[in-house]
Amino acid sequence: MKRLFLCLFSLFIIFPFFTARTTVFAEQQRVRLPVVMYHNVLNGRQGEYVVSERQLESDLIAIKKAGYTFVSAKQVIDFVDGKGSLPQKPLLLTFDDGNYNNMYYAFPLLKKHGACAVFNVIGAFVSASSNSSQADNPNYSHLTWKEISTLHKSGKIEIGNHTYGMHVYKPRFGVGQMEGESETQYRAAVKEDAGRLQTELSRRSGVTPVVFAYPFGKYTTSAKEELLSLGFRMLFTCNEGVTTVVRGDSSTLHYVRRFNRNGKMSTKTLLEEIESGKHIPVDS
C-alpha cells in the first residue's frame, strides 16, 4: 500500500510538469511572426513610405505595450534550425532601401527602446553615397559602406541584401524576368546581381547578409532558388500579412510577409493589423 501511494504521489507531481513541458514544446513548433516594413523616417512630411520620428517612437512604445518582443532575423532563423526558442509574441522590424535617415533618425530610437531591426540596402545607392560629398543629408542620402559597418558592429542592426542594381522599374521590374530573356540568362542575372552586393558588403563593410528583400515585392520561383543557392535564409516579400515560422521547416522563411508602415496610418491601425494579421487599407 505504501509503495502504491508513493507511485501515485510521484505521478501527481511529475505528470503536470511533463504536460506543461509538452505544451510549451508543442507551441514552440509553430510561431506567429508579424514583420513591419518601414522605409523613410523624416520630419515635416508623411506618405505611403514616409513616417516621422514621432510616429516611429509611438509604434515602438505601442508594440511593446501590446506584449510583443522585438527579435532579430538571426533569432528567427535559429528557431527554425532548432537552435533556440522565440518569445511568446515575437515581432521583427525591417527598414528597406538603406536610407541615411534610418541611421540618423531611426537608429537612436531603436536603441532607446531596446529594439533591433534589419536594414535592407541597395548596392548601387550605397556606392553612390560612398562616393558623394553630400552623403549625410537625411532627406535624400543613403548609407555608405562605412556606416553600414558601424551599424552592423552595434549588434542592434542586421544588414539585408536588397539587390545591387535591380531596384528599378525597367527594363527589368525588380528581380522579374524580362521579356525575351531565357531562363538561363535570367537566373544568371539574379545571381550575379545579388552576389555582387554580397561581395561588396563583405569586402567593404565586413558583413555577409543571410536575408534578402525583394524590390517592390516582385518574386519568382527561379529567383528564390538562385538566392537560396547564394546562402540566403530569409526572403522578405511585400505581401501584407503574418507569417507562421515552423521549427525544422526552412521553407517557412522563403516568403515572409510584411506590413508596410504607411505614414498616413495611425499607430492604432498598425497595431490592429499586427494583431489581426490582416491588411487595413488607408485612405490616400
Image (spheres, rainbow, N blue to C red):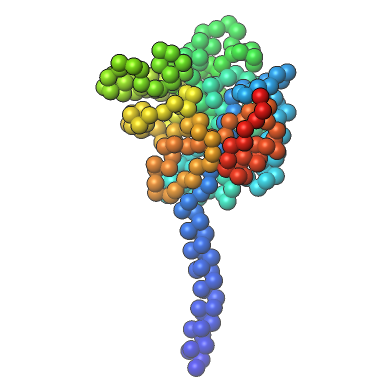
Residue 137 vs residue 234, the one in the foreground: 234
Q: Position of residue 89 (x, y in %)?
A: 59, 48
Q: Which residue is rendered at x = 50% and y = 68% of the image?
A: 18
Q: Which residue is rendered at x = 30% and y = 16% of the image?
A: 180
Image height check: is 167 above or below 207?
Answer: above
Q: Splitting the image into 4 quarters, where does residue 250 fall?
A: top left
Image-based side of 184 in relation to 120, left or right: left
Image height check: is 165 above or below 206?
Answer: above
Q: Which residue is rendered at x = 53% and y = 47% of the image?
A: 32
Residue 219 vs residue 246, the one in the foreground: 219
Q: Position of residue 1 (x, y in %)?
A: 50, 93
Q: Which residue is rendered at x = 44% and y = 48% of the image?
A: 246
Numbered label tally: 0
**Camera sees residue 14:** yes
Q: Position of residue 229 (x, y in %)?
A: 32, 31
**Camera sees residue 56:** no
Image-based side of 181 in relation to 162, left or right: left
